[in-house]
Image (cartoon, rainbow, N blue to C red):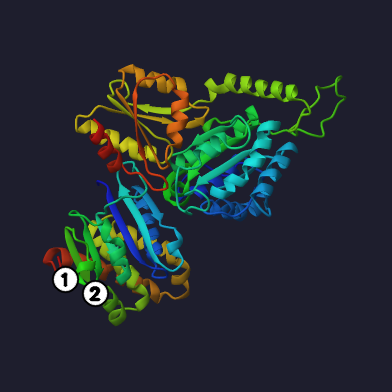
């Protein structure tokens, strides 16, 4: 596998860093070279939070990057904040329920993909697993880790919560599967392609 | 020494956490510190581990105090350390200077953040001058600049040994990226890797009659006479120069036929390594040179690398406005290679930045 660069961005509390950590952990568990670095400037105190992940079979160079293979914006504000990480090779993902002016979307992208993650979470699952849908979508778009590895990493990260409430396990795994499917579908059909 | 790990093990952790584990594996007994980003988690992880392993920790009232308490603890024979960054590094120059003057085996971790002043809490390579030559002395210090989590682990262990073997203050120079990112590494007990930890020993309260049983122990940081200080500093300089060949560490790749050598240190050298590979694939003969010890500097080795082909250009890339550049120029004075620079103070450098710069000057 050649180097895959992923930028996840959202509001504090949306679980951006948690998702990044689980993804990176899953990649590490699959014996891949992995780097995960959060941005930790003053913006973490009430601003857009970004996570940078890189996964490769070979040694990885610099911890940050200018252009990503996949950018996921989990909030409206995050779109403007991350559009600079997008170029002609980037899959730019955002929630199709956001009110976005066309000029806020990146000028360059391989594909701009809107997926109804918030809506699906609210209607079919639970608002809290919105970020797990997004995690599934990242896997669907990149195959950065196997679905099984993602489930295992989720299990180990959320073990204490699953123990208290076993229903949460099913809910999270379902969210992961739905996210993956949505992403794969959007690649095939160009659903929600605004570019 | 008690083994920390049953067997060496892989881990996927932050650099700060790796430092805490490595200090533990190295047999460190106590940490003194004061919070500052991006080194906080060194303290956090150490305080989590300390009670489990019977280790000590003291949060002092400020960085001056943290540095001086390390100076005190090592005199009593304790393997002590501290960690700081940015303005904290500025404040610690006073105790670091005392460690230079009294030849104390002080070990400190510096996680560089942006400057001047509070700058950013994020990242830079702007504490090179301060860490190598800060204080009102001659920079008789040993400074390891790491690039990976494995090196962070390895050089934390080595740093304690260097400090106690040579008794010059020793530093691990990292940065906010290395502090905060997660990356795989192997953690091990030093013995498993054939590393013998230098035994610590008290510098004060020694037994025996002075002049008969033992030499007097001079632990002095102030002198009455100019001539006294002059002699001491000359002696330190001679000792430092004598051990330089065995301390110097560096990495070199592809300099044998290089038209241009990219010189970088720390985390930037990862990007330089990638850039050299890409440039070579495109037919540009680029080489890579990285000092691991910034003090003492691999002066002889860099001169040799430059003169091998010889290289026409030396590109110095750093996340500072010329701190590595100045350090290098004073070390290779007299070489006629053209020196170019890529200065990006306080921001990260990726392979793309270096490749673009090389193409613009070749």
Q: Which residue is mark 1?
A: A192
Q: Chain of mark 1?
A: A
Q: Position of residue B356 (x, y in %)?
A: 25, 39
As displayed, is residue B185 above or below residue B314? Answer: below
Q: Chain of mark 2?
A: A
As displayed, is residue A142 above or below residue B261? Answer: below
Residue A66, label in figure: none
Residue A186 falls in which quadrant of the image?
bottom left
Q: Do labels 2 and 1 touch, CB within 8 Å? A: yes
Q: Residue furthest front?
A: B226
Identified at 68% across, 55% down, the residue is B61
SS for tag 1? loop
Q: Residues within 10 Å of mark 1 (few under 14, many from 20)?
A: some
Q: Which residue is mark 2?
A: A116
Closest to the observer, B361 or B125: B361
SS for tag 2? loop
Q: Residues within 10 Å of mark 2 (few under 14, many from 20)?
A: some
Identified at 33% across, 58% down, the residue is A149
- Image mark count: 2
Residue B206 falls in which quadrant of the image?
top right
């Amino acid at each position: 596998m050649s180097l895959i660069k992923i930028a996840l961005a959202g509001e504090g509390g949306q679980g951006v860093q948690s998702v990044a950590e689980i993804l990176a952990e899953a990649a590490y568990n699959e014996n891949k070279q992995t780097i995960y670095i959060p941005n930790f400037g003053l913006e973490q105190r009430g601003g857009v939070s970004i996570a940078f992940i890189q996964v490769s079979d070979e040694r990885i160079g610099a911890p940050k990057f200018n252009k990503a293979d996949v950018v996921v914006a989990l909030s409206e504000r995050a779109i403007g904040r991350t559009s600079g990480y997008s170029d002609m090779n980037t899959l730019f993902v955002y929630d199709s329920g956001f009110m976005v002016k066309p000029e806020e979307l990146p000028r360059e992208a391989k594909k701009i993909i809107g997926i109804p993650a918030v809506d699906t979470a609210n209607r079919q699952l639970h608002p809290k697993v919105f970020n797990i849908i997004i995690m599934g979508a990242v896997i669907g778009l990149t195959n950065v880790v196997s679905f099984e590895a993602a489930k295992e990493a989720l299990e180990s990260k959320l073990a204490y919560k699953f123990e208290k409430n076993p229903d949460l396990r099913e809910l999270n795994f379902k969210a992961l599967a739905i996210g993956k499917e949505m992403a794969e579908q959007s690649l095939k059909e160009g659903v929600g392609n605004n570019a | 020494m008690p083994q920390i790990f049953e067997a060496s093990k892989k881990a996927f952790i932050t650099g700060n956490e790796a430092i805490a584990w490595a200090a533990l594996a190295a047999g460190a007994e106590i940490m003194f510190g004061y919070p500052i980003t991006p080194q906080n988690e060194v303290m956090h992880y150490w305080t989590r581990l300390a009670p489990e392993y019977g280790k000590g920790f003291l949060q002092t009232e400020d960085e001056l105090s943290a540095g001086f308490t390390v100076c005190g603890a090592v005199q009593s024979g304790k393997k002590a350390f501290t960690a700081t960054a940015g303005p904290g590094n500025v404040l610690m120059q006073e105790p670091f200077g005392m460690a230079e003057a009294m030849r104390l085996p002080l070990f400190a971790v510096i996680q560089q953040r942006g400057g001047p002043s509070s700058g950013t809490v994020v990242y830079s390579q702007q504490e090179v001058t301060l860490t190598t030559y800060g204080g009102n002395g001659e920079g008789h210090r040993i400074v390891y600049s790491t690039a990976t989590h494995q090196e962070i682990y390895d050089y934390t262990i080595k740093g304690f040994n260097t400090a106690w073997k040579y008794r010059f203050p020793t530093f691990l120079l990292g940065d906010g990226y290395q502090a905060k990112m997660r990356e795989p590494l192997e953690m091990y007990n030093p013995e498993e890797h054939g590393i013998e930890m230098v035994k610590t020993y008290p510098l004060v309260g020694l037994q025996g009659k002075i002049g008969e049983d033992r030499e007097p122990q001079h632990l002095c940081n102030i002198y009455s006479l100019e001539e006294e200080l002059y002699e001491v500093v000359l002696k330190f300089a001679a000792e430092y120069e004598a051990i330089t060949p065995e301390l110097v560490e560096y990495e070199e790749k592809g300099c044998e036929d290089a038209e241009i050598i990219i010189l970088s240190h720390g985390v930037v050298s990862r990007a330089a390594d990638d850039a050299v590979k890409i440039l070579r694939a495109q037919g540009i003969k680029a080489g890579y040179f990285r000092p691991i010890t910034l003090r003492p500097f691999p002066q002889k080795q860099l001169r040799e690398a430059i003169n091998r082909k010889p290289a026409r250009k030396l590109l110095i890339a750093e996340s500072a406005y010329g701190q590595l550049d100045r350090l290098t120029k004073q070390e290779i004075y007299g070489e006629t290679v053209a020196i170019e620079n890529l200065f990006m103070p306080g921001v990260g450098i990726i392979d793309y930045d270096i490749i673009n710069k090389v193409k613009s000057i070749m």
